[in-house]
Image (cartoon, grey):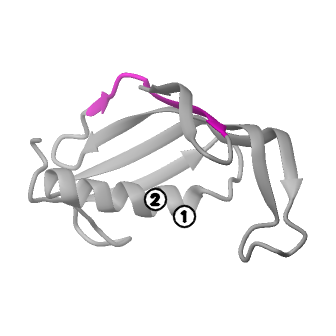
Amino acid sequence: MALAGQRVQLGVYFLEEHPLTDYSQRLIDTQLQLTHGIGVADAGEPSAAELDVFFNSMGTDNDQFGLTLPTLGLTPGASSIDLLALDMYHGITEGYAMIRSAADGGIQKTERVLARIRRDNVSTPIINFPINQLED
């Protein structure tokens, strides 16, 4: 909140090279602007602080199993019809951020951020309904 209307240098880091680095950086940049009015400065541009975001883990898993019936090309856009299927999506993100003030060099660390999503849905030809949904 103290940085609202100011610009920060943004760094996004994973434990190892990760294909989601650019995506994560762009998402955090946009969220900072939308939520707090904080702009992200280009490299070498003056800024009020450095914001470094460290991801300890990030991952998703998507799976489906059950009984399906092939459409044999009779239904456009679908290769099969679910007679009784379980669709599962699980995601997790864990990390924290550190903010270094450009004015006095002071460092603040956020609490660990943990976001989990779990969505399990049952699908039939007539109805789809959730059996388990968790978001925190």
Residue shown at 68% from the left, 59% from the top: 19
Query: Above or below — where is 129 with respect to 41?
Result: above
| Nearer to us in this view, 132 or 18 | 132
- Which residue is identified by label 1? 22
Quadrant of the rendering where the N terminus is positioned: top left
Q: Real-space Cα distance between discs 2 and 1?
A: 5 Å
Task: State the predominant SS element of the stretch in magenta.
Answer: strand
Residue shown at 87% from the left, 52% from the top: 69
- Contact between marks 2 and 1 (CB within 8 A): the answer is yes
Magenta range is 107-123
Quadrant of the rendering where the C terminus is positioned: top left
Q: Is residue 97 visible?
A: yes
Asked whether 119 falls inside the magenta stretch, the response is yes
SS type, badge 1 = helix
| Nearer to us in this view, 20 or 79 | 79
- Amino acid type of the residue tagged 1 in the rendering: Asp
Residue shown at 37% from the left, 54% from the top: 28
Find residue 25 and name its label.
2
Location of residue 93 in the rendering, given as x and y in whole percent from the top left corner: 54, 35
